[in-house]
Amino acid sequence: MQRDPLRIWISKNLQTLTFLGAYLITTVAGNLIYASPLAEQSVRGSGYRLEFLQFPHTFTVGFWLLLLCPFVLTPLIVWATRRMAAGRADRFAQLLPEFSRSAYLSIAAACVGFVLYRFWVADVANLFASGVDAGSSVQARFTIRDRIGYITFVPLQALLPFLVIYALIRSMKSREVFWAACTLIGTVVLSVVLIMINMKWPVLLFYVGLVLAIFVYSHSRPYLKTAMGAFFLFVGFMLMSTWVFRLAHAPQISRSAASATSRPAAGSVHTPAKPRAADEVPVSPSALSEASDQVVATGKAARLFAPTILIVALNRMAISYPYYYQIATEEGAVCGGLMAQARRDPSCRPSTLVYQRIHTTDRFRYRGTSPIAAHISSYALGGWPLAMVALVAASVILGLFAALPLDGGGVSRTGVILGALTGYHLSQVPGEGAIFYEHGLIWPVLLIAGYGLWHRLTPARNSKTSS
């Protein structure tokens, strides 16, 4: 495939760029603002307290070194790992079998069928629609998670996104109607079920994977298609945030909401004040159904609340870092070290501890979490030594993905995108989370390994059914 030099460079460094880019936007940028004269305005606009600005260890040399070290170490480690692993990665990629049409349909149908069955048993549709405000919406999300369980989230957030991205890459490579149809149907179905868990990031991250795949593997107009995808991602983020926090006051929304200056309450649900009764604009009483009214109201609320949504997004993870650094530096490993966290359901986790320190009056303070990048999470467990081990390990993982050939088979190409999504997770959650959580790397790897083993054990059948 022909690519211009810029596209080649971005594609070959996609995993590093995703990791550092997500980390910069969600964690670093906010802390740079906290060290500027804009700190108070940014923090108060998100509903947080200003106490962390007075922590003894905030803005110290160690504070900045831990925050910024990935920008120096990760590119070097990824480069070295890729150079050492390139030859082996090429040979490994050649061993990965392509999914046959029958196998792909069987696996995808089994995943979708299982998810839909679990949704039906848990009455997810009614729970999804039950939220009338931000608090009840978050409560519905927790209830959904409890009812469908971890076992349902694995195909929902790990296997099905991998399969749809694989179909998209196969369709761009072969231009076959079968794979294009699988991409379209899979995208629609997965979008619906992901939205129904009442969370915005899983569906948005799935779309990010699609956009990245289009940029790397599209045969024509990659920059235009990527720009369009980025625009729709931004719109999707605004609409999903508006819906999850129930900002739309359907069937009425307030004109004055855009200039509202009231401070939202601190806690897991940081939302602007609900529109006031005065100045309300009724939605046109046409033949629109109730669902259509909700869509219209959500779109209007997304436009009005856009500044607040963006400020909250900028601060949501960034504000956790000063707490992580202060607690670990001043108090040590409050939740125990690495071995304590390796136990099943430990009584204390750094992410829950930090959440409780930030959100002292939040109704979800015993269930909410404040996760952060892998090396910072490790700093909370073992100080600088464990933080460096975690950063090196994360960078090596990204380097192994970067060593995969860009233009190998469909599974290898999907692995390139999977590595980029893993980079995102490593910038947001502890290292074990990027591997073993419901969206973790381990599940598509096991799927590929399982299919590869089955393919080798049944060569005659697969030679007849492979596409």
Image (cartoon, helix red, strand yellow):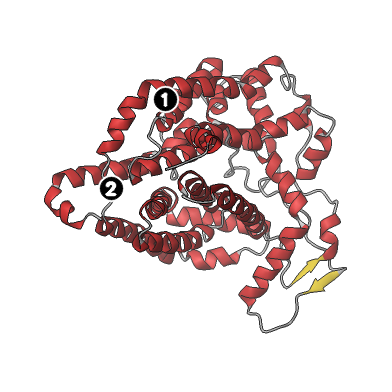
Q: Name the image quarter holding the N terminus.
A: top left
Give above or below for 145 relative to 442: below
Q: Tell me if residue 113 can be seen.
A: no
| Rendered residue at 44%/27% (across/down) | 399
The residue closer to the viewer here, 53 or 237, is: 237
Identify residue type, mark 1: Arg
Number of numbered callouts drawn: 2
> Which residue, given by chain and number where applicable, does mark 2 sit on?
98
Identify residue type, mark 2: Glu
| Rendered residue at 36%/44% (across/down) | 444
| Rendered residue at 50%/32% (across/down) | 13
Give above or below for 341 relative to 283: above
Q: Position of residue 347 (x, y in %)?
A: 50, 34
Q: Tell me if residue 167 can be seen.
A: yes
The residue closer to the viewer here, 399 or 327, is: 399
Earlier-in-chain disc, 2 versus 1: 1
Near mark 1 (Cα within 10 A), the count class, few <14, some 14-19 or many ≥20, is many
Q: Position of residue 145 (x, y in %)?
A: 49, 53
> Which residue, given by chain and number where applicable, does mark 1 sit on?
82
Residue extending furthest toward the bottom: 287
Give above or below for 232 relative to 28: below
Q: Position of residue 219 (x, y in %)?
A: 46, 50
Q: Position of residue 386 (x, y in %)?
A: 50, 19
Taking the image as shown, residue 452 lies to the left or right of residue 252, namely: left
Quarter of the image for residue 72 reads top right
* Cβ–Cβ under 8 Å for marks 2 and 1: no
